[in-house]
Amino acid sequence: MSKVVGIILAGGEGRRMGYHNKGLLPLAGKPMIAHVIEKIAPQVDKLYISANDDLEQYGIFNLPIIPDEIAWQGNGPLAGIASVLKHLSDDDIVQVVSCDGPMIPDNLVALLGVERMAEKVVYPETQDRGHYLYLQGKVADLRAIESLLEAKDLRIRALLAKLQAKAVLFADEDAFLNCNYPEDIQRLEEIIDEEL
């Protein structure tokens, strides 16, 4: 049976959040990434944080933290994923999530089910749009990211096209709410308050 490995992408610059590290911003009394860890950790066999700054603060979560390889620094989420892949086996399955998406489904990994579907890569899609940063794929196939990095094609969509990724329909758009702007945190706070 393949091992499922989670990667929390926390290496962004947070430009639209005033250059604050989004994963460490407070949400309902704890860092945003703590909510993500609570949701994804029970769904995977091992969990990594991909981060380039504030490593000491991320260290409190007692998870392996992998910075971007020097050659790929500044090249966005593909660099973060590729850097973690170097620590994984070809037969592992990777579930990518974002540090600023605290509402992900408790059964995200199972519903995407890349192994069951015999696809190279799958990602969630709602009625509104595709949520590419929550892709799931087999490590052997995802190693194709390196050729995209070498070609300076840094778009997640380029990877999805290269591997003929398939979308899996999810009903709840709110499950993929993330924080790009300060007002997004307020919206998430309201949703969390309603759930309590």
Image (spheres, grey):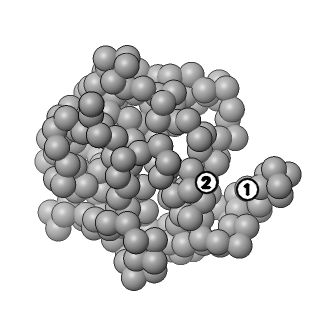
Q: Are marks 1 and 2 in contact (CB under 8 Å)?
A: yes
Q: Nearer the viewer, residue 87 or 46?
A: 46
Instruction: Look at 46% across and 71% down and name the residue there.
Output: 61
Q: Is residue 181 above or below residue 167?
A: below
- Residue most toward the front? 1
Q: Picture coordinates of residue 175 (x, y %)? A: 65, 41
Q: Is residue 77 visible?
A: no
In which quadrant of the rendered image does the N terminus lie? top left
Instruction: Look at 19% across and 35% down and name the residue there.
Output: 91
Q: Nearer the viewer, residue 180 or 49?
A: 49
The type of residue carrying mark 1 is Leu
Q: Picture coordinates of residue 149 (x, y %)? A: 20, 48
Which badge, 1 or 2, is on the more N-terminal residue?
A: 2
Instruction: Look at 56% across and 56% down and name the residue there.
Output: 38
Q: Residues within 10 Å of mark 2 (few under 14, many from 20)?
A: many
Number of numbered markers: 2
In which quadrant of the rendered image does the C terminus lie? bottom right
Q: Picture coordinates of residue 90 (x, y %)? A: 16, 38
User: Which residue bears the numbered disc 2?
Assistant: 102
Numbered label attached to residue 83? none
Write down the quadrant of residue 185 in the picture: bottom right
Instruction: Look at 27% across and 67% down and name the residue there.
Output: 67
User: Which residue bears the numbered disc 1?
Assistant: 188
